[in-house]
Image: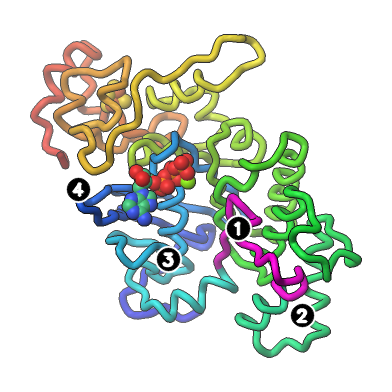
Amino acid sequence: MTLLDGDEPLPPDLVMSVKDLKVWYGTARGPVRAVDGVSFDIRRGETLGLVGESGSGKSTLGRGVLGLLPDAAEVSGKVLFRGRDRVTMKRRALRSLRGPELGLIFQEPMTRLNPLMRISDHFFETLHTHERGLSKTQMRKRAIDTLGAMGIPPTRFTNYPHEFSGGMRQRIMIALALVLNPAFVVADEPTTALDVLVEAQIIGILNDIKRNFDTSILLITHNLGIIAEACERVAVMYAGRIAEQGDARAVFARPAHPYTRELLASTISLSTTELHYIPGAPPDLIHPPSGCRFHPRCPDAMRVCPTRHPPTVVTELNQKVDCWLHGPDQLIPPGGKESLEREAIGVADEA
Ligand code: ATP
Ligand code: SF4
Ligand code: MG
């Protein structure tokens, strides 16, 4: 593909690179800083899990990288997809990319499937919009093959949405997102409305997609168990920013950010019957806390934390973490945390 003027080539192993993305929603009380300076990469054929409490900006981020935000949203930063900058790309070019190259799997399939249209018509409409050259026979074959890969038999092709169970409807939604063979898909809470057995099936399907179609997936979920089963890497979001990101197993084994640690502790574990809640509530994103946004709830907060946002530091396990406990190296003096309290104040950084 030819690069447009001003586009940056991406390394061949990357499908998407997001740099300092901000999405602010205008409201009467002031802008909601739903995504506020987020950077991450997605590699070819990998699933990146995006986890965080309700209202932390996960869906906004997922929609932002697809260019699916309401007009009132103010967006800045870069989303490089195959070398194109999607944030500055013209709307028409964005639309033409969305179907064939980028897909979205929604949380509630029933609200996205038209109850008056047969499943076959949903597929014909999608294929007709994005691949105009296909004959009806070719469209039918593509649709039935993709549905078959999701375990929906050809005999159900002309059924209406209400004739399927919730789990089957979700699989139909996944097939609709995949029938154009996109390079990158955002799956926003794809299993939330489903029971545990169906949830396991959907996770299995997402893993198959990755293997068989080489699709990259941004998987948004509240559920750390799903991340562990389906994701190579994880990004932990707090109040519009990514607190920590890295290899999923490394992050689970040695969380570097106190918020990740608290989030892991709040997940029900087989070894304990006690449920741990993170004290306090997520902040108001119109007036987020100063410095590190987690400081009002952080058990490790230091004097520096409310004054300056910590810079991103890479740990020895290659985790990227925004927390003063981790440096940067030149700021961690031999005296440890106590001297950090004295020395870190006054370090020039964004407020
Ligand atoms: P959940 O886990 O509940 O789905 P989330 O992490 O996906 O939450 P978002 O839906 O992205 O969070 O919302 C982030 C913040 O942006 C919230 O404070 C939300 O109220 C606000 N927000 C979302 N959409 C809009 C909008 N269209 N206008 C104004 N504020 C919005
Ligand atoms: Fe806690 Fe400070 Fe680290 Fe923020 S920067 S997570 S307040 S220790
Ligand atoms: Mg959401």
Picture quadrant where residue 69 is located: bottom left
Q: Amino acid at mark 1?
A: Thr
Label 3 sits on a secondary structure element that is loop
Looking at the image, residue 326 lies above or below residue 41: above
* Residue 67: mark in rendering: 3
Residue 38 shows in the view: no
Distance, label 1 to label 2, CA atoms, is: 24 Å
The residue lying at 47 percent from left, 30 percent from top is 317
Regarding mark 4 in the picture, which secondary structure is present there? loop
Upstream in the sequence, badge 4 or badge 3? 4
The dot on residue 111 is 1
Position of 274 with respect to 290 (left or right) is right
Q: Earlier in the sequence, mark 3 or mark 1?
A: 3
Foreground mark, 4 or 3, reads 4
Mark 2 or mark 3: name the one nearer the start of the chain. Answer: 3
Distance between mark 1 and mark 4 Cα atoms: 30 Å
Q: Quadrant of residue 350?
A: top left
Does the residue at mark 3 contact the one at mark 1 (Cβ under 8 Å)?
Answer: no
Residue 226: within the magenta? no
The residue where tag 4 is placed is 29
Mark 1 against mark 2, which lies toward the viewer? 1
Q: Which residues are magenta?
A: 102-122
Extreme residue toward the left, this view: 346
Please give the name of the residue rendered at 42% of the width and 65% of the height, measured from the top-left corner.
67
Under mark 4, the amino acid is Arg
- Which residue in the structure is indicated by mark 2? 139
Q: How is the image coloured?
A: rainbow
| Foreground label between 3 and 1 | 1
Residue 23 visible in image: yes
In the image, residue 262 lies at what x, y percent? 44, 21
